[in-house]
Image (spheres, helix red, strand yellow):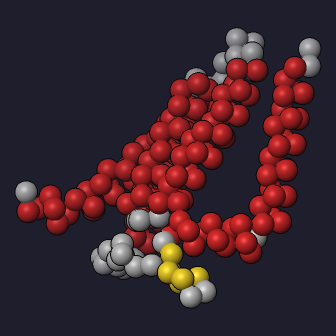
């Protein structure tokens, strides 16, 4: 029990990080687009869990709502619009298996080289630490909300209009016969 309380956060990190990597690999290797989309959703949720582990609750919730909800609905909408039965069967890696294997080993070696020399801080952030905005102490989510809706209101509204136009365009293109 003592080991679990001391190393629980690290175990959860490696569990969710491994899950995100496995889901990301499944996104690019599965042949069925629907299974790839479900794997992408698993990757989004694993990344949201990593944000929660780092006490970035706002980013975790945004990751779940925006990517896990909105973007996945758009992906599934596009997948359902495409007639998958008319697509021809494509071989995985198009006969370039040895080249892909060599590149994968080289990239794995490169990542291993950088991770072996990296120094990660072991200290956990203080969850009771509050941010100052003006003379008032607020939490993480409130500080992001204040900055977003006070300082960056115009870019936020412009981005929301772009997303609205993109969704209307997708519906118009999807309804065309």
Residue sitting at x 84%, y 23%: 174
Is residue 25 something one can see in this rendering?
A: no
Q: Residue at x 90, y 27 (%)?
A: 172
Q: Residue at x 57, y 73 (%)?
A: 143
The residue shown at (44%, 47%) is 46
Where is the N terminus found, in terms of image quarters?
bottom left
Q: Is residue 148 above or below residue 8?
A: below
Vertical placement of 38 versus 144: above or below?
Answer: above
Q: At which x and y percent is residue 64?
A: 54, 46
Residue in the foreground of this view, choosing between 135 and 3? 135
Residue nearest the observer in this picture, 97 or 173: 173
Locate residue 26 relative to residue 6 in the image: left or right: right
Comparing 158 with 176, the one in front is: 158
Q: Do we see residue 63 in this rendering?
A: yes
The outermost residue toward the bottom is 135
Q: Position of residue 104 (x, y in %)?
A: 50, 51
Figure quadrant of residue 31: top right
How many discs appear?
0
Residue 43 at x, y = what percent? 49, 44
Residue 67 appears left or right of 150: left
To which quarter of the image does residue 8 belong? bottom left
Q: Quadrant of the C terminus?
A: top right
């Amino acid at each position: 029990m003592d080991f679990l309380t001391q190393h629980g956060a690290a175990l959860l990190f490696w569990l969710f990080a491994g899950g995100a990597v496995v889901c990301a690999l499944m996104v690019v290797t599965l042949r069925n687009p629907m299974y790839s989309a479900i794997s992408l959703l698993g990757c989004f949720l694993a990344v949201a869990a990593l944000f929660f582990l780092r006490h970035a609750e706002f980013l975790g919730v945004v990751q779940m709502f925006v990517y896990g909800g909105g973007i996945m609905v758009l992906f599934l909408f596009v997948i359902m619009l495409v007639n998958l039965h008319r697509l021809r069967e494509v071989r995985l890696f198009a006969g370039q298996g040895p080249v892909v294997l060599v590149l994968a080993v080289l990239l794995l070696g490169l990542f291993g080289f950088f991770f072996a020399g990296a120094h990660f801080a072991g200290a956990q952030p203080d969850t009771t630490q509050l941010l100052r905005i003006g003379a008032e102490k607020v939490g993480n989510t409130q500080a992001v909300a204040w900055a977003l809706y006070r300082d960056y209101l115009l870019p936020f509204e412009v981005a929301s209009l772009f997303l609205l136009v993109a969704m209307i365009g997708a519906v118009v293109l999807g309804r065309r016969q």
